[in-house]
Structures are given as structure tokens and as C-alpha cells.
Amino acid sequence: MKVGFIGLGAMGRPMAKRIKAAGFDLAVCDVVAEAVQEMAALGAEARADASDVAKDSDIVCMSLPNSAILKDVVLGEKGVLKTLKSGALVIDLSSVEPQVSRQLAEAVRTRGAAMIDAPVSGGVSGAESGALTIMVGGAAEDLARAEVVLKHLGKKISHVGGNGSGQAIKLVNNLLLGANMAAAAEALTLGRKLGLSPETMLEIISQSSGQSYALTAKAEKFIFKGNFAPGFAVDLQYKDLELAVSTAKSLAVPLPMGNMAQQLFEVARAEGRGREDISSVIKFYEEMAKTEVRSES
Ligand code: NAD
């Protein structure tokens, strides 16, 4: 079986590596030549663009930054639909608007092929170890066909509903992640100002009612070390909050926490920190409070 992989970024590259390591015949592309070369060195076929990847793939995986790029990669001049084989399966691992996902699934259907949305959670480390949570929208029989690949990427694979519903739950999850990350940064900064050590805060709060993934995944590895290399980039979290905020507006659902969290990530972007990890949202609080939440050791 031939598998294609489009988008070899922080998440896509480790996922593509796992698919290759599982023994699949793999063709890849990315606009960044270095990413493609790294995969070619592991035995993947380097292809020029998405249509070139799709032309002989039975399964086409995509892990792309946002809806606009995803649409171009699927529908554009050199897109997947130009060459997609009838009967092929498209697996979209990106996080995008549920509505866009449904539109693309419909376009894929007109080619006699099928698409599922399969956004993931678990970060780069989850992608490297094959321990992602994968939230699937689409037909049950298409998920059954996708499992041959997905089982190498995720530990928990959940069928949520029809096309777009994987994206819907991912949007809700990442609304919570963005709000929790901002709240954890705020709380740690106040704690530091009160004279608490970063390690004490983490040890006690991670066992108490204030604990969250944002705190346990981001405090020790990122904030305490002053290491803000992604990880999960501010630009992507901002995009995910925009998905939540704009979708909520269209449904007349108030989202005060989501809007506020998005503004904090907007500050990071305005300061040129869009490519830093989401934990860098703490720098806003640290600057305001004139302190830093770093390990002393
Ligand atoms: P990334 O920006 O590191 O990777 C995206 C890749 O797509 C890049 O290598 C880029 O060069 C490539 N690309 C852009 N345009 C392209 C095109 N036209 N053709 C081919 N390749 C193209 O992003 P990421 O962190 O890997 O995230 C990918 C998706 O997964 C996003 O939708 C993100 O929201 C989601 N996600 C990320 C994480 C995380 O922790 N990083 C976790 C869960 C979900």
C-alpha cells in the first residue's frame, strides 16, 4: 500500500517517520526542502507538490498549518484533487474549521474518493512516540480503512461522528488548552511574586485542584528552563482560538475566556514570538510583574 504525506512540520515529520518505520511505501512533500530531504534520507520518495504525492497514493495524509493552506493543498492548481485516485482515502491530521473540513470531504467525494478529519492531540512528543489522541470525523468504514495507518500514530482513536466532528471536538479541546495555558502562566507569575519556588508550585498544584495539562506539560520543560522552542507554536494556538471564537460568533455563543486568552497570544505575536511555544505567553505576565518563573538550579 502506498501512503502519501503532505506537511512535514513539527507534527507531520515525526508522524511520517513512524509511517515509514512501520514499513509503508511513503511519498512526501513540503514547501521546506530540508524537511523533505530528511525524509528522503530515511527512504521516503521526495515529491514536488501535493498533486505529485496524490497521484499514486492509496492513502494521503496531511498535517498543515491552517484552513487556507489546507484548501490550497487540496483544491489548488497543484493540489491533491488534481490527481487523486478513485477509491483513495484522504486523512487530514491538521486542525481547521469543521465547516472547511466538511466542504473538502464533499469535494473529495466528487472524485470517487473519501476523506476523514483526524485532528490530533498530544504534541510533538506524542507524535514521536505514537501516543497521540486522534479525533475522527467521517464514515465508520473510512475510519476502519484508515486504522492501518492511524494505529501507528495514536493510542486513543475515537470516532466522534460525521465529517467535521473530529474538528469540532478538537476546537473545543484547544479552546480549553489556550485558556488553561494563559491561566497557568498568570497563576505561576503571582506565585513567584509571593516568593514561592517554581518547583514547589508545580509539585503541589499538579496534585491539587488547580492542575491542568498546560501546567504539567509546560511548566518544568519549558517555563522553568526558559526554553520556549516549540512544542506547540503561539501562532497555531492563536489560530485554534480564532477557530473557536469565530465559530462561537456564528452560533451566537459568548466566549469571554476564549477571547481574552486569544488576546494574550496576540500580545506574544505582536512581540514577534509567534513561533515560540505557547508557554511563552508567560512573558507578558513576567514583564508586567517584573519577575521570572525560572528554576534556580
Ligand atoms: P508546522 O507549522 O510545524 O508544520 C506545518 C508544515 O506544513 C510545515 O513544514 C510547512 O512547511 C508545511 N506546509 C505549509 N504549506 C505547505 C504546502 N502548501 N504544501 C506542503 N507543505 C506545506 O505545524 P505543526 O505544529 O506540525 O502543526 C500541524 C497541524 O497540526 C496544525 O494544524 C496544528 O494546529 C496541528 N497540531 C499541532 C500540534 C503541536 O503540538 N505542534 C498538536 C496538535 C495539533
Image (tube, helix red, strand yellow):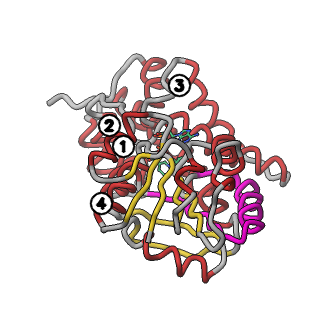
Tell me which segment is drawn in magenta.
95-121
Residue 105 highlighted magenta (yes or no): yes
Above/below status of 4 relative to 195: below
Measured Cα–Cα span from mark 2 to mark 1: 5 Å
- Whichever of labels 4 and 3 marks the residue nearer the N terminus, that label is 4
Q: Which residue is mark 1?
A: 218
Element type where label 4 sits in the image: helix
Q: Amino acid at mark 1?
A: Lys
Residue in the picture at 67% in, 70% down:
113
Q: Between marks 1 and 3, how big is the CA–CA gap?
A: 16 Å
Q: Please name the residue that numbered disc 3 is placed on.
A: 268
Circle on res. 222? 2
Which residue corresponds to mark 4?
A: 129
Do tag 2 and tag 1 residues touch (Cβ < 8 Å)? yes
Q: Residues within 10 Å of mark 3 (few under 14, many from 20)?
A: many
- Picture coordinates of residue 5, whole percent (x, y): 47, 54
- The residue under the point 62% across, 40% down is 239
- Amino acid type at image mark 3: Ala
